[in-house]
Each structure stands twice: as structure tokens, then as C-alpha cells.
Image (spheres, rainbow, N blue to C red):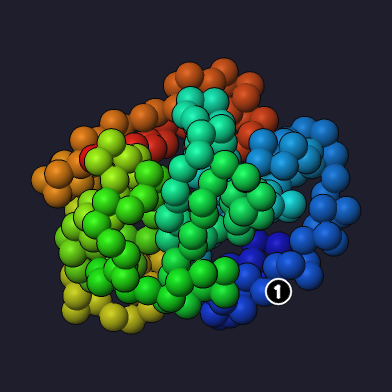
Amino acid sequence: MKKLFKFILNTIPRPILIRLSFLIRPLLVLFLKGKKYTDPIDGKSFRKFLPYGYGKQRPNVLSPSTLSLERHRLLWLYLKNETDFFTKPQKVLHFAPEQAFYKGFRKQKNLDYTTTDLNSPLADVKADICNLPFEDDTYDVILCNHVLEHIPDDTKAMQELFRVLKPGGMGIFQIPQDLNREQTFEDNSITDPKKRTEIFGQYDHVRVYGRDYFEKLRSIGFKVDEVDYTSDLSSELVDKYRLAKGEIIPVCWK
């Protein structure tokens, strides 16, 4: 199973995977139905989750129903329990919209919800994150998760995120995390997909961020809260929801 998922992730383009997933999910839900683990996004429970990873596969992390990963479920719980995201009327911009969130966010009547990406079939607006077609101070909330590690000029991307966020607005910019790494590493000479996967964690990543990521966001102008939300949850819930213990949510304010 792990080898099959690894092969699929590394050979089929992401836009095609998104379309195929709509056909495959009902079968996965039926096959893996159980009570041990729960996806808090839709409340469905399973006997196990699926493996996931472009390089080393992580076992028991991909929800069969929403296709959420650890980071998606953690963010959902944080937004639901600790913010007014699901209750207050607000204008939201969502980069590279994740399937795990797309339908749920689209249904929220309190949200004026716009998605954007260069390639995703779920994007309302096709746009370059380094040159956004939006006015200054437009959005109350910006979600840009696991995007910046793909962008060669991440400084320019961060500046654009800051520009279009309203004063007082909230941005959440999750990245793949190595909490043991202090300094971000990037090397533009590394172009081989296999080598990128080995060094950066995925074939289309251009860097691996360290803990200095938060300081870089602050240098752009954001006030950054490094939220370890798993520390507020019991170990039983962390396991039940299949979360990554200690993962930091970068909550950014303008």
C-alpha cells in the first residue's frame, strides 16, 4: 500500500490527482470504515487512515473521507475552537485550496470565500502569488498553507500576502516543519526531482524551512503567534485525530 501511494504521488500531476480523488474517496470510506480514528472535519470515523508522503511515507495519516492530513485536521480544530472563522462575516482568500477544506468553507454563509492558484482546478482566480491581482487591504483572512516552499521568491510572496491582508486581519501560512532545523536551506542548483525529494521533502519544493521562518514573516511586518495547539489537547485526542504532536501553526496578524 505504501509503495503504491508513493508511486501515485510522484508520477501523477496534482491537478489530475484532485480530479481522480473525487471518484476514489467513496470506495476508501466504505473499505476503511471503523471507530478507532476520527476526522474532525467531517466527523467520520475509520479503523485506520492511509499512508502518505512523497519521500518517506508516514503511516496512518491520510483521512479516507476528506483526504485531510495532520496539518489540515489541526488547523480545522484551531479555527473552529479558537477563532470566529466559522461565525463572523469575513472576506477570505485561500491559496492552493485543499480539498479537505474546500467544500466546508464554500458552504459557510458567513464567508465571502475566494480561492486562487496558478494550476488548481479548484481556483476561482488564476494568479501568481508574487503578483496578485487584488487591491491593498482587501481580505480579513488569508490561508496559504504548504505553498511558500514551492515559491522561488518567497520574500515577494510574503510581501504580497501582507499587502492584500486588511489591517487587523489574520493570515495562516503553514509550511512543512523541521523543528530541529534552525536555519532555512535552499539551493537553486538542485533541480533533479529525486534529489529535491531527498533534500527538500518533495520533488517540487525549492527549500526546507527552519525555525527562522517565523522571524522572516516578522521582518515582512507580520505579528506572528507560534501556536502549538496540540499542547492544548489530550494525548488521546491527538491520537484519535491523528495529529502531529508539536506542530506549530503560524498565525500572522497585520
Q: Hey, which quadrant is residue 44 in on the image?
A: top right
Residue 236 lies in quadrant? top right
| Lateral position of residue 166 relative to residue 194, left or right | left
Residue for point 51% across, 51% down: 112
Q: x, y (%) of residue 66?
A: 68, 52
Q: Considering the image in quadrants, where does the C terminus appear?
A: top left
Instruction: Please name the residue shown 19% across and 79% down the image.
Output: 189
Residue 185 makes an appearance in the image: no
Residue 140, x across and y down, in percent: 38, 44
Q: Is residue 196 left or right of residue 51?
A: left
Please name the amino acid that badge 1 sits on: Leu
Looking at the image, residue 53 lies above or below residue 62: below
Residue ID for mark 1: 20
**From the image, which quarter does the N terminus lie in?**
bottom right
Residue at (20, 46) in percent of width and height: 217
- Residue at 57% x, 74% y is 121
Q: Report which quarter residue 128 is drawn in.
A: bottom left
